[in-house]
Image (spheres, grey):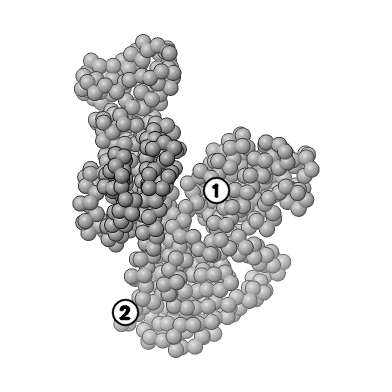
Amino acid sequence: MRERLLLVADFNVETLARYLANTAMPGADVQAAPFGQVYQTLSSPGPGAEWSALIWTQPDATIDTFRRAANFEPVDAERALDEVRAFAESLKRFARNTRSLFVPTWTMPWWSRGYGMLEFRRDVGLAHLLSRMNLALADAVAEEPAIFVLDAQRWLAAAGPRAVTLKPWYAAKTPFSSAVFEQAAGDLSAAFNALGGRARRLIILDLDEVLWGGIVGEVGWEGITLGGHDYAGEAFADFQRSLKALTRRGIQLAIASKNDEAVALEVFDRHPEMVLKREDFVCWRINWADKAQNVAELLRQVNLGAESAVFIDDSPIERARVTTAVPGVVAPEWPDDPTRYREVLSALPLFDTPELTDEDRGRSRMYAVDRTRQETREAAGDLDTWLQSLNITVIVEELTSADLPRATQLLNKTNQLNMATRRLAPHELEQWASLPQNLFGDSGLTGIVGLTFAPDHARLTDFLLSCRVMGRNVEETMLHAAVRHCRARSVASLVAEFMPTARNAPCLEFLERSGLQRTTAHQFRWNAAEPYHVPRWVSVDDRTNTSSPAER
Amino acid sequence: MDRERALTLIYGAIDAVNQQLPAARRLAKDPATVIVGPGGALDSLGIVTFALALEEQSTDALGRSVTLFKPQWFGDESSPFQSVDRLATFLSTLEHS
């Protein structure tokens, strides 16, 4: 789907529009609303559900009390906050007819010293008032899942001392330098990637000179540089802490390293300053094989596409090899200096998510369990023995508002086993969802089946399953649940229309082997007079009000 | 500043402005490239962006404040901003602090 973004500002925002359309988000439809027409635009019905919008204002132009405060008039801060809340209401109204709404925080230039040493004194300082205004704005829209308040102060800091100068304002009615717009465009691009399910979810790491200094195969675990009273050692340990922190946001870690596995793993087991432990990694390939081959195997093992992965390696040759052989993997330019590792990792605009759920925070643990399951499979040998050993129970429940954050996340992040790849904001899903069914379990909410009923047939509107549980007969169980609902409503057939994308071929492969009758290249049908049987090794706990019993 | 250094600064400013242009309209890093006047690819906002970027880079390079943003130059085909070549010649006359 082509991204559409309307820019609304009380300054000339054309530079940002050009940067977005030509560099940060090529191919996007970016339009700038008439300059200085913020309130007029916000009073309009909104650009439509296919459009996102950016509302970027300056505090003295939007909040009259702040304008007076900036002129050093005495003001009532509460009045400024009331104006902020009124502005937030207009944003909320406008957001009802937009896909997503982005609102940069209000900022002041570094050269505006205001009251100097009193800048953070309550009821005096402009910086104090502006901070309260930004927090009031964020709080006022906190319950609006489609509104995202973006941290513009970070853009100014990254752009340096020339971020805000008056010359471009006088010359072109734009208060910010191109460097600020470049930062803003980067964050907007990251946000669209997150909303479109294109955020990265896996970091594949080299070991020597990445997680520690030195070559462990030569110096042994005792000889590597890590922690201690050494500037490089501290930097490596800090970098590991940053990686570990990312796992708490649902980012997974893996290893691709040219080493002897036993020697490398000894570092994890024996080095006292290792922050990352074996259990922090979902999988690894530590051998002397081609790294690109290892990366491809890791991706297969965790059921993720190359577009989900970031590859970190100190060798530009290995980075080039992997990005060439496994297109879609991002391998950021990596500094030689380990003291910069943490900075570079933290600045990567690749991991944004529109929601953060408890499942994200626990995903590392779930993947660790999956690794154990996979090892069990390898030990078990044949597929049936492995599936039997998993003792899978699929719980089928109707969607509730409590599930919306995770369900929306699943809709927007799942790529491979996703039949229609519909991307919906929470409010859009809430509006649409009369009958999608959820699948929960130890693995959390992992799949969504959406059904639309016509008099004689039901259409499978959504059919998607997290890559974490693909290949464990959960897909077939979801079809079973869908057919069961069809039979309960006495409709004649279930129709599935596959919508191809660059990444959902695994879904087509599943439909082809599912037993559904293929009626056209992308359409499949099941005669609902017949039950779709539950796979042999799966138990179903159907908590919906379907009268038909589970059919084996 | 020597001419080579001047061209490097101009090409840096071209990089900055090219990020805001469609691929087909991007400026070539070539002395013959026209910046202001007939045959130029930049509109008024593009010229402002280019001039401010070059002004910043020249200020950093020379270690003193340099003012290149002079609106009267942007409508004048005889101004230093007419082409990359003419601009490089002009910058070459600027002295370090």
| Residue B67 placement (x, y as % from top left) | 33, 20
Task: Please name the residue shown 52% across and 73% down the image.
Answer: A440
Residue A148 in sight from this viewpoint: no
Quarter of the figure that contains the C terminus of chain A: bottom right
- According to the image, label 1 marks what residue? A310
Alpha carbon separation for disc pair 1 and 2: 44 Å
Q: Residues within 10 Å of mark 2 (few under 14, many from 20)?
A: few
Name the subunit of mark 2. A
Is residue A413 something that shows in the picture? Answer: yes
Q: Label 1 is placed on what type of residue?
A: Val
Element class at badge 2: loop
**Front tag of 1 and 2:** 1
- Chain to which mark 1 belongs: A
Type of residue at label 2? Ala
Name which quarter of the figure residue A13 lies in.
Answer: top left
Using the image, tell me which numbered label, if any, was put on residue A454: 2
x and y, in percent, of residue A15 in the image: 31, 38
State the residue lying farthest toward the front: A74
Screen quadrant of the N terminus of chain A: bottom left
